[in-house]
């Protein structure tokens, strides 16, 4: 097997005990942060090999290979969740503000009622303070 330019080194093939699988260690080199973008040519080569050899299955494991699939899936999931989560979040936040404001409004109405009823009572009583 010839290593593509994206691969820094290829190790020795290790067969499984039953002989039905092989492990081929390879090293991309470089930074692991962008390994998912550098692994695409290898994924394409694996897919082409699977198509050329019916019944062959090639799986890749490593920082780039395992980060690529979930990273793309998470991005799609977030895009679908945004239109739902934003209105729900606003509803919960403003619902909490309204719920917190109800006791304040009740307290203010009771204070207003107390002032109004005491003014009414004092208005009807004769003034003895003069």
Image: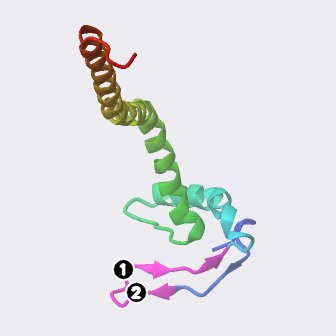
Mark 1–mark 2 distance (CA, rounded to whole Å): 6 Å
Q: Is residue 122 above or below residue 8?
A: above
Q: Residue at x 24, y 12 (%)?
A: 125
Residue 128 sits in quarter? top left
- Give how far across and how far down residue 116 sits, in percent: 30, 16
Q: Residue furthest top?
A: 124
- Give how far across and how far down residue 45 sits, in percent: 59, 59
Mark 2: few/some/many CA within 10 Å (<14, 14-19, 20+):
few
Disc 1 secondary structure class: loop
Q: Which residue is mark 1?
A: 20
Residue 7 sits in quarter? bottom right
Q: Nearer the viewer, residue 76 or 87?
A: 87
Q: Residue at x 45, y 87 (%)?
A: 15
| Residues at discs 1 and 2 in contact (Cβ within 8 Å) | yes
Q: Is residue 121 above or below residue 105?
A: above
Q: Which residue is mark 2?
A: 16
Residue stretch rendered in magenta on the structure: 14-27
Q: Is residue 126 above or below residue 39?
A: above
| Quadrant showing the C terminus | top left
| Quadrant showing the N terminus | bottom right
Magenta span contains residue 26: yes
């Amino acid at each position: 097997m010839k290593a593509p330019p994206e691969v820094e080194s290829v190790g020795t093939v290790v067969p499984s005990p039953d002989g039905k699988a092989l492990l081929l260690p390879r090293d991309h080199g470089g930074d692991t942060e962008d390994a998912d973008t550098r692994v695409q040519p290898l994924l394409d080569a694996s897919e082409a090999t699977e198509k050329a050899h019916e019944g062959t299955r090639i799986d890749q494991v490593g920082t780039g290979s395992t980060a690529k699939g979930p990273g793309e899936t998470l991005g799609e999931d977030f895009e679908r969740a945004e239109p739902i989560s934003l209105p729900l979040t606003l509803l919960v936040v403003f619902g909490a503000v309204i719920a917190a404001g109800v006791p304040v409004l009740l307290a203010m109405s009771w204070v207003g009622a107390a002032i109004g009823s005491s003014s009414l009572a004092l208005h009807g009583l004769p003034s003895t303070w003069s």
